[in-house]
Amino acid sequence: VARTASRPLAAGDISTFQSFVFLGGQLSLALCVLLCLNYYSIVLGATSLSLVVTYPLMKRITYWPQLVLGLTFNWGALLGWSAIKGSCEWSVCLPLYLSGVMWTLVYDTIYAHQDKRDDIMIGVKSTALQFQEDTKLWLSGFSLAMLLSLCVAGMNCNQTFPYYSAVAAVGAHLAHQV
């Protein structure tokens, strides 16, 4: 993919072995952070590993790798809440998590449009290829779902005017961006 050709591994600036050493260091640091959390959060964090491991393969399997990315990246909404509160308040955490997943679908689909030609050439999939000329419609739907999920999360934890003002500002930004 032309856009990523200058990245260190793709450009040959670092070896595969060096990248695995770096990965090992990152995973070790992540484990240290995870082990500082409460037991509930440790278990919750460990359950995300299946998503972390499978995400890199998704472009080869499905036109929805951005969904798996969203499920993976936004696990922090669940983990952050449980780290502070000791467990998840699902009436807040699930809509918050869903809003993050929807946001990831929006921004990563936009981002994936840069690679459409290369993706077709090398045989990988994306929502950008799946949606094609209907992308704006899909992104509008994901944006609306994100905003509604943020409102539900806010209602379920008794947020007030400043929160909903911020949600409205996000909605205005999404309307402009999409």
Image (cartoon, rainbow, N blue to C red):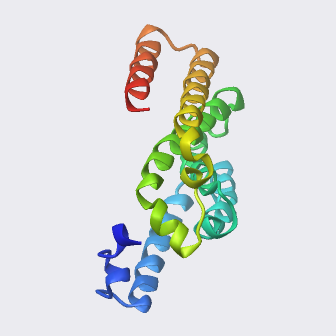
Is the residue 4 above or below the residue 136 in the image?
A: below
Q: Residue at x 61, y 38 (%)?
A: 97
Judge left or right: residue 14 versus residue 124.
left
Left or right: 6 as drawn, with respect to 131: left
Q: Classify 63 as above or below 85.
A: below
**Of residues 34 and 7, the one drawn nearer to the viewer in this rendering:** 7
Would you say 125 lies left or right of 18 here? right
- Considering every residue shown, the one lying at the far top of the view is 161
Q: Residue furthest front?
A: 133
From the top left corner, tell me how far across and down residue 106 is, in percent: 51, 40
Residue at 60 percent across and 23 percent down: it is 153
User: Residue 86 at x, y = what percent?
Assistant: 63, 40
Q: Is residue 47 visible?
A: yes
Q: Residue at x 55, y 42 (%)?
A: 133
Residue situated in front as seen by the camera: 64 or 79: 64
93 shown above or below 22: above
x 54%, y 29%: residue: 140
Image quadrant occupied by the C terminus: top left
Q: Quadrant of the N terminus?
A: bottom left
Q: Residue 155 falls in which quadrant of the image? A: top right
Task: Give 12 or 160, whichever is nearer the viewer.
Answer: 12
Decide if residue 80 is in sight here. no
User: How many marks on residues?
Assistant: 0
Residue sitting nearer the eye, 102 or 84: 102
Asked whether, in this view, residue 61 is left or right of residue 178, the answer is: right
| Residue 101 image-quadrant placement | top right
